[in-house]
Each structure stands twice: as structure tokens, then as C-alpha cells.
Image (cartoon, rainbow, N blue to C red):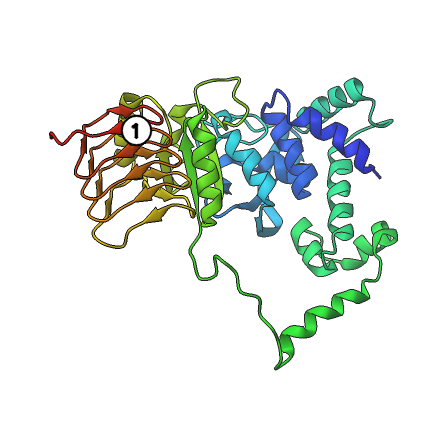
Amino acid sequence: MLTESQCQLIEQELTGAVEPRKVGAYLCLHMGLMLSEVCALRWGEIDLTEGAVEIRQMAVKTGSGLALTAAELPRRLPMPPHVRRFLLRRAGLYPEGDCFIMTGSRELPAFYMMQNVLSAVNKRRGVAATLSAMDLRNAFIRRCIQSGMDLYTLCFYVGIRQPNVILKRFGEYFVPRPESVAVLEKYSQERQVPLSASEGTARMNLLILGAGSQGPVVREIAEALGIFSEIAFLDDDPNNKLAIGPLSDYKKLRYAFPAAIPSFGDSDLRRAYFDKLLAAGYAIPRLIHPSATISKSNVKLGSGVVVEAKVIIANDVTVEDNVILSAGCVLDRECVIHADSHVGCACTVTRGSVVPTKLRVPAGAVYDKKER
């Protein structure tokens, strides 16, 4: 049985210089798929929006090679969150839904393709005497048991009908957990339910276009709001480790990320992608840091407005679409901030002033212009 230190060595190999065969091996390690299942799996059977994998077919050997047949135990498997994030970053490997996971094309993979990549991993890392897809699947089962997954759920997830099969092979990893009796609290009339800050709030996924200096600020605001299940970046800098892909990937991530926002200091670039996101059908939220103070009297904020920490907005202020209000700036009464502009950190925009479209007000400035 692979140890955790051995699994970590394998993980390092599978997540570096990723190609389709490594994606298949990753699914064996992190979802326990059988070799026959992962060889038959197509990109269109992975639902990144719901975070689930459909197991419908399996590959079987025939006299002339491999063929597809119905899965012995068809099932829909929820993905662990880290698997979903891994697959989101690799969407570019699969140009269409009919592509097989193991080849990145419509060509049905052969079983030896998996063994070839695992043998190469083992040669580089010296993980074990031998390394196979079954070893990865067994490591997944061990992890599930040690994490407390019940036996029948585990049987369903890995497609084994008889629990005794797992008990016989993995019995040493099952341990009693008497403390789990605490869950019976839910049956008590005196049950105390903790309140959640996001209770009753619908959660969605947010895509941030631009992972430069402005991007992480936007992510911090989004995280502070607590309404996004997943937050990811796109950026054209291949060396930016925050990004899951280039900016052009927004076109194919629409259903995985219902909401998106451009995050560029350059106002022209920010406007260009604001329009592209709208045309693609994204919701473009306004993001307001919880520490900002905003009057309840006639304040209008457009789509894509970013309000950073400690911003103060007085009454009768209008902020149009795609504006950045940097940390600590103050908008006095009756201001108008036109679209695509950027009010810098600790700025003061005086009463009745008008900031033109795409203007950047420098940090710390006092802006006092009434002309429209």
C-alpha cells in the first residue's frame, strides 16, 4: 500500500507539466477510478459547474484492442474540491466534449498509456518497486477510510458491490470512532444550531480576469464577502501562478463561473473585458469590502464597481460601471464618478465633484472639479 509520502511524490509529478495521461492518473489517485473507467471517460462527462463526474462506460479488451461497454455500476460522483480546481486549470487540454480524458482527442486510449506515464513517474521519483493505476486507486480507498467515510458510501463511490471486498483488503485501516456519537445531537429537542454568517445566502463561483497587483485585492474583497464557493484567476502571463489559464479562457468557463469581473489597472483594458464578459452572459457583480461605509441615502453603484477597505461614500453619490474605489478614499456628497475611472488610495473627492470617464485620480489627491 502506498504511504502518504509516496503519494506526495506521485502528486508532484502529476501536477507538473500536465498532459492528458497525467490527468487520468490524477483521477485514479484522487477519485479512485478504475483504469477501465478512466480510459472510457470523456471531457463532456465531467460537470465542472456541479462538480461531478458521470461514470457511464468502461473500456474492455477485445481481440482487436479496446472497446467501450456500459459501466458495471453507472454512477454520478461528486468531485472533491481540489479535483474540480485541478480540472478547471486543465480545461484547455480538451477542445471538445467528445475528447477522452487520457488522450485529449477522440482517439480511444489504450491501457498501456497509463502504465507508461506511471512507470516514467516511478523511474524519476523511485516511489516503489512497481507503480500501477490500481496502486493509486487503493491509496484513494485508504484515504477515504482514514478520513471516516462509511463503508457503504465508499463501496458506491469506487464501484464495488460487496463491502466484504473492501473489508478483506483494507480492514487494518478501519478504526472505531466512538466520539462520532456527538452527531446524535441533531435528534435532541435542545439542539443548538450555530448561526452562519452566510446562512441563507446563495453561493456561486467568481472568475477574476487579471492576476496582477489589482487582482489579489479583488480576491480579498470577494473572500471577505463569503458568498463565493470558488474564486479563480485568468491572466495572459504564463508565469503567474495564480492564474488557471489565459484571459481567452473566459469563453469556455461561463457555466463553471457564473460571475466574473475584470481586474486591470488599465482602464481601456478593463472596459474591453467588461464588455466581453457582458456579451458572454456573465453576471458582473459589484464587490464592496465589509469595512466600507456607504450612505443609505440615494447612493447608486453600477456593475463591476470595486469598493476597497475603509472607503467612505456619502449620500447622493453616483458611481457608474467598472469603477475602482481604492482603500480609504472618501466620496463627499453629490459626487459623480463616471464609468471606468479609478479613485486612488486615500483620495478625497469633494462635494459635487465629477470624475470623468477613465480618469485615474492619484493616491492621496484632493479632487475638486465640478465640470461634467
Kindly indicate the quadrant of the structure image that contains residue 206: top left
Q: Residues within 10 Å of mark 1 (few under 14, many from 20)?
A: many
Q: Total of numbered circles in the picture?
A: 1
Q: Is residue 31 above or below residue 280?
A: below
Q: Which residue does the image show at 27% across and 41% down from the upper left?
A: 303
Q: Is residue 194 visible?
A: yes
Q: Which residue does the image show at 29% across and 31% down from the upper left?
A: 274
Q: Which residue does the image show at 60% across and 47% down from the upper left?
A: 71
Kindly indicate the quadrant of the structure image that contains residue 182: bottom right
Q: Is residue 324 left or right of residue 367?
A: right
Place of residue 52 in the rendered image (x, y in percent of width and height, measured from the top left): 53, 47
Q: 328 or 169: which is nearer to us?
A: 328
Q: Quadrant of the N terminus?
A: top right
Q: In this figure, which residue is indicated by the disc labeled 1?
A: 342
Q: Is residue 328 left or right of residue 53?
A: left
Q: Quadrant of the C terminus?
A: top left
Q: 7 or 247: which is nearer to us?
A: 247
Place of residue 173 in the rendered image (x, y in percent of width and height, measured from the top left): 84, 51
Kindly indicate the quadrant of the structure image that contains residue 24: top right
Badge 1 marks a residue whose secondary structure is strand
Q: Is residue 238 left or right of residue 169?
A: left
Farthest residue to the bottom: give it: 189
Label 1 sits on what residue type?
His
Q: 335 or 226: which is nearer to us?
A: 335
Place of residue 15 in the rendered image (x, y in percent of width and height, measured from the top left): 64, 27
Q: Is residue 112 visible?
A: no
Place of residue 9 in the rendered image (x, y in percent of width and height, measured from the top left): 76, 28
